Amino acid sequence: MTETGAPPTRAAVILPYHRPAQPSGVVEFNPGAVRAAEARLAEAVGLAASIGVTIVHSAIHPLRERRPSTLMGEGQVEAARQAMEDQEVELVVVDAALTPVQQRNLERAWGAKVIDRTGLILEIFGERARTREGVLQVELAHLSYQRTRLVRSWTHLERQRGGFGFLGGPGESQLEIDRRLIDDRIIRLKKELEQVRRTRGLHRKAREKVPFPVVALVGYTNAGKSTLFNALTGAGVYAENQLFATLDPTMRQIRLPSGRTAILSDTVGFISELPTQLVEAFRATLEEVAAADIILHVRDAAHPDSAAQRADVLKVLSEMSEGPDAALDEDWQSRVLEVLNKADLLPGRELPGIAVSALNEEGLDTLLAIIDQRLSASEHVEEFRIQAGDGARIAWLHRHAEVLSTEAEEDVLVIRVRISEAARSRFLRIPPAGEEPPHGSANDP
């Protein structure tokens, strides 16, 4: 956010708080799961701090009504102005959705740049996206948001948002040209994204040929998903105590107690009031969740807003199962296991789920055993007779199924395994040793 060598931007975080009604569709998950103002402010401060600014002031301003001109009341705007003047604030993050007019008026009143919750989250995504699709989706979201800011009500266009950040921007005489350029770029981005999705679809079909079950981690941002992912896989995925530490899906193999292999997928964290421009940026993550045999809902058990965070995640997943283009099937809840992370911060308390501490690696053996047991429930026992010298097919069964017993009958091995239907079909396509593979078939690497 700041140039090399320059001091960090001094920022303030303002929460115009209006206690919301219970979100629609959340009742069945957790009645009354509504965030406290203090917890919402803490989250907003964490989001703002993650873009490298120094938070010198934060405050909650209760709203009795939403004013079209400034969102908050005149007295609240003035009180905030005095605090920002005292703290020499350069940037104000308002944890709410601001209209362009409200944003302009608040910038005038406070003498500082103002961004809303949408602009802040877009800023974070712009810094953290790594994959080709992630970068394209974030740029598309930025442009869609930026286009709504191109309004003739701006009179201080040196502060008009431009590019990937909230600094700099076009002049008013360029308004129509800018809008046309943005529209053209949006069209090109959508075409590029379609190509990226087609390529990813081919990769997913290739993975489906190797019938490893998929276990997807989901949860509210900063619940500890990436730390748990690293603990289970030994991977070095970036994991820090900050919001949106990782944005792009990551997949690694894990070995379960029975000896079977599964694929663990780490995904971007969910967040309340996700900007509509960024919903599509979750596409890759949502597709991985949809393809998962088990969905591990990782929760921060020690967070004061854990119940509300749980409701937010389940609400998003529920919406994914609705409509003609639903990504999740209607039975998705039967595949969810709740993992209560950071249980070490609640010693002696009995938790209603699988309690673990990813940081201290406590409870991971139990978690793996439960995953193994759940996957076994969808499999059946079968017996195969294989030539003793057919090492490739014997090894394949050991990698892709749970071997229950092996008996030798002269030069034949009778192997009893617990195996999924997908793995069984794949195994039957592998030719015995010495035989030519059928045209078009391919063995696993």
Image: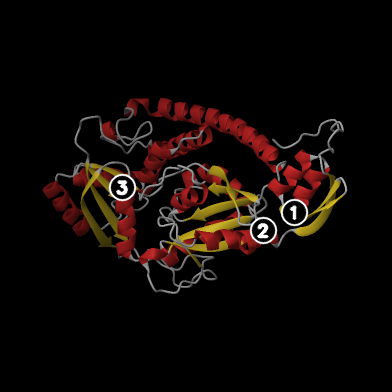
Residue marked by disc 2:
375
- Decide: marks 3, 2 in contact (CB < 8 A)? no
Look at label 1 and name its amino acid: Ser
Residue density around tag 1, few if under 14, some if 14–19, many if 20 or more, within 10 Å: many
Task: Choose the circle earlier in sequence order: 3 or 2.
Answer: 3
Q: Nearer the viewer, residue 114 or 348?
A: 348
Q: Residue 132 vs residue 440: left or right?
A: left
| Type of amino acid at the residue the image marks with label 3 | Ala
Is 75 rendered above or below residue 180? below
Q: Position of residue 297 (x, y in %)?
A: 52, 59
Examine the rendering and report whether any part of residue 22 can be seen. yes
Residue 345 lies in quadrant: bottom left
Q: Which mark is residue 48?
A: 3
Number of marks in the rendered image: 3
Mark 2 nearby-residue class (10 Å; few <14, some 14–19, many ≥20): some
Q: Nearer the viewer, residue 138 or 342?
A: 342
Q: Which residue is mark 1?
A: 420
Q: Residue at x 84, y 46 (%)?
A: 386
Q: How is the image coloured?
A: secondary structure
Q: Give the CA separation, mark 3 to mark 2.
A: 41 Å
Rendering coords of residue 24 (x, y %): 51, 65
Q: Position of residue 368 (x, y in %)?
A: 57, 58
Q: Secondary structure at mark 3?
A: helix
Q: Are marks 2 and 1 in contact (CB under 8 Å)?
A: yes
